[in-house]
Image (cartoon, grey):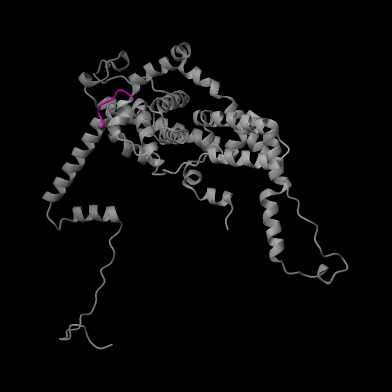
Amino acid sequence: MASEDARYRQSSQFRLWSFSPSQLAAAREKTNIQAQSSIAARIASTPNTSAPTSNANTPDPDGTPSLPDFLTPAEEAVMVSFYVSELLRAGDHAEVGEVVKATGAAFFRRFYVTNSIMTYPPHDMIIVALFFACKAEGIFPRIGEFISKFGRDRPEEILAGEYLLCQGIRFAFDVKHPFRALKGAAMELRRLGDIDEQRINNAERRAREILGFSPLITDAYFHYTPSQIMLAALSLADRVLAERLISHTFHYVAPPSDSGPGTPMATGDAPVSRRDVKVEDKEAIIGSHIRDKVLGTVLACRDMLAKELPERREHWGNKVVYKAQIQPIRKKLNKCRDPDRWNLVELQRARREQAGNRSDSEDDEPEENPRSLEKDAAVFGDALPAKRRKVVKTEDPFGPPL
């Protein structure tokens, strides 16, 4: 049976959405550069009458609109964290569970790794991510009732962004969270029998508060596994209990071999028994030499979570902080946003019309037009070679005898 670590490495969360810090920074920088080039091309091709009304897009003497000052990857990261805090507030307002809010935040952060915040409107995508997170977690609210909680009355504003969100997260709807791992850790600590129950309860409650905010605002889900995030949160709540749990888990020491110098099997090439293989596997998974490595990883995750403790909820909603840090970036964003993709409803309508025009033009073409055949082949791959069968003419409806 595969270990839990091996099963996690087969999940889409690990295969598609786990990065080293340098890989994540490179992906965001690439997304930012691509967004700048595409938005610049669209602004240059947009008539001046329909250009955004700001002095950043006033035309040059030759009539070409001047390019705005684009957001940097660092500014985009700040805005993503700000809108994640807004998503969590929206989840509280809609009275959804902690797992739904965490899934929505994970969807939102994943979407803006490969999509720029200058391309698609984050204030719409937080509602899209939260609504789709409900469905991903098996809750199916009526869209009219759901959006009415946020003062909206147009369901198409949310439905228009759903497929965009699915594309952006690569259709990876399964998000693995550390909440259940925290329950298991508390049960394991109670099983030890020498720790005060109230202390365990206090640590579990504080760790759950941390898990509901800190890893969602930071990049912890991209860099660490759910169990590592759980242990880091537990370490912030009660470091002694977390280190006790780690030491208790990774304590295995392989027993000495039974064969000594006087036994017949001590010399020569002895066959490896099934017991020896199990001992090696157990030592590789929970051996004492793994403890220091795990502890180092947990402490690194702990430092990341410590930068955004639950008390920082008020920081992101503070008016002084908003005016000093967020408002200047939002003003900059209003000048450099994509003119063709900011309105999700209009974008969906334009794409439907484009698809309809394409299908009409294909219907008008002759059936044997090579171009249409090439397009069909491009959808399903290269055409398979035709198989020729020799047909035996016979009067027997069941064919010739075997």
- Residue in front for this viewpoint, 183 or 16: 183
Q: Quadrant of residue 310?
A: top right
Residue drawn at (76%, 69%) of the image: 270
115 falls in the magenta region: no
The residue lying furthest to the right in this view is 262
Relative vertical location of residue 383 with respect to residue 151 in this rendering, above or below: below
Quarter in which the C terminus is drawn = bottom left
Q: Position of residue 365 (x, y in %)?
A: 12, 51
Q: Position of residue 91 (x, y in %)?
A: 41, 28
Dominant SS in magenta: loop
> Can residue 301 be seen from the camera position used here?
no
Q: Position of residue 338 (x, y in %)?
A: 31, 27
Residue drawn at (42%, 36%) of the image: 107
Relative vertical location of residue 370 with respect to residue 218 in this rendering, above or below: below
> Can residue 353 be seen from the camera position used here?
yes
Q: Quadrant of residue 281?
A: bottom right
Relative vertical location of residue 287 with respect to residue 205 in this rendering, above or below: below
Q: Which residues are magenta?
A: 150-155
For residue 398, side relative to residue 77 (left or right): left
